[in-house]
Image (spheres, rainbow, N blue to C red):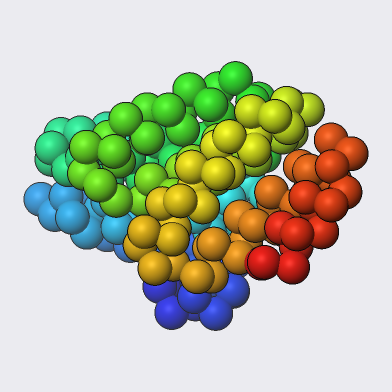
C-alpha cells in the first residue's frame, strides 16, 4: 500500500490500507494499525474524501495518544488541520495546527511544516500580514534544518503574500530567491 501511495495511486493504496485495517482490527499491533490508519487517511485526503480522512486521522490520534507517541500525535493534528483547511474551516484548522506546533516545538521536529501550514491558513483568511509572520518563521526553521526544497516553497508563498499586499518589489525578491 505504501508503494502505491508513493506512486500517487491513492485509489489502489486506499484499498490495501482498508484491507490492512480489517486484518489488524483484532490483533494487538498498535504500530501496524497506526500506520494503516495514517496511510488510509492520507490516501483519502489526496482523493478529496475529507470525511473519511478526518475519521482516520482522529482514530490515529486516539491510538497515538494511547501509545504516548508525541510525534504521532503532532502528525495526526497536522493531518486533521489539513482536512479542516481544505474544507474551509480555518478556525478548526488553526486549532489543530497550534496543537501540533506545541508538541513539535518540544520535540524540535516538523515545526517548519506546521508554521507554513499556519501561514497558508492565515493567507486563506486574507490575513497576509500574519501569513508573512508565520512564513518567515517557517523559512527560518527550514534554513536551520538545511531544507532547501521547503525553503523554496515557502519563499514562493512569501512572494504570493507580498504580491497580494501590493509589495511588488518584495514579491519579486522572494520569487527570485525561491
**Side of 9 where 20 appears, left or right:** left
Instruction: Name the residue furthest front.
Output: 169
Q: Position of residue 38 (x, y in %)?
A: 38, 53
Residue 35 in sight from this viewpoint: yes
**Side of 98 where 31 appears, left or right:** left
Residue 45 to residue 91: above or below = below
The residue located at (37%, 35%) in the rendering is 100
The residue located at (44%, 58%) in the rendering is 142
Closer to the camera, 90 or 163? 163
Closer to the camera, 26 or 144? 144
**On-image quarter of the N terminus:** bottom left
Residue 117 in sight from this viewpoint: no
Closer to the camera, 119 or 173? 173
Closer to the camera, 65 or 59? 65
Q: Position of residue 57 (x, y in %)?
A: 42, 41
Snapshot quadrant of residue 17: bottom left
Q: Position of residue 51 (x, y in %)?
A: 58, 36
Amino acid at each position: 500500500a505504501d508503494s502505491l501511495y508513493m506512486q500517487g495511486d491513492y485509489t489502489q493504496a486506499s484499498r490495501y490500507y482498508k484491507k490492512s485495517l480489517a486484518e489488524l482490527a483484532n490483533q494487538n499491533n498498535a504500530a501496524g494499525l497506526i500506520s494503516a490508519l495514517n496511510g488510509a487517511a492520507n490516501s483519502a485526503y489526496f482523493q478529496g474524501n475529507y470525511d473519511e480522512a478526518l475519521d482516520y486521522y482522529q482514530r490515529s490520534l486516539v491510538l497515538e495518544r494511547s501509545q504516548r507517541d508525541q510525534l504521532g500525535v503532532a502528525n495526526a493534528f497536522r493531518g486533521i488541520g489539513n482536512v479542516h483547511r481544505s474544507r474551509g474551516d480555518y478556525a478548526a484548522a488553526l486549532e489543530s495546527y497550534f496543537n501540533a506546533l506545541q508538541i513539535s516545538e518540544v520535540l524540535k521536529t516538523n515545526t517548519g511544516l506546521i508554521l507554513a501550514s499556519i501561514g497558508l491558513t492565515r493567507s486563506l483568511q486574507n490575513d497576509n500580514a500574519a501569513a508573512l509572520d508565520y512564513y518567515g518563521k517557517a523559512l527560518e526553521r527550514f534554513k536551520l534544518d538545511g531544507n532547501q526544497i521547503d525553503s523554496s516553497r515557502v519563499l514562493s508563498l512569501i512572494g504570493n503574500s507580498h504580491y497580494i499586499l501590493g509589495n511588488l518589489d518584495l514579491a519579486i525578491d522572494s520569487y527570485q530567491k525561491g
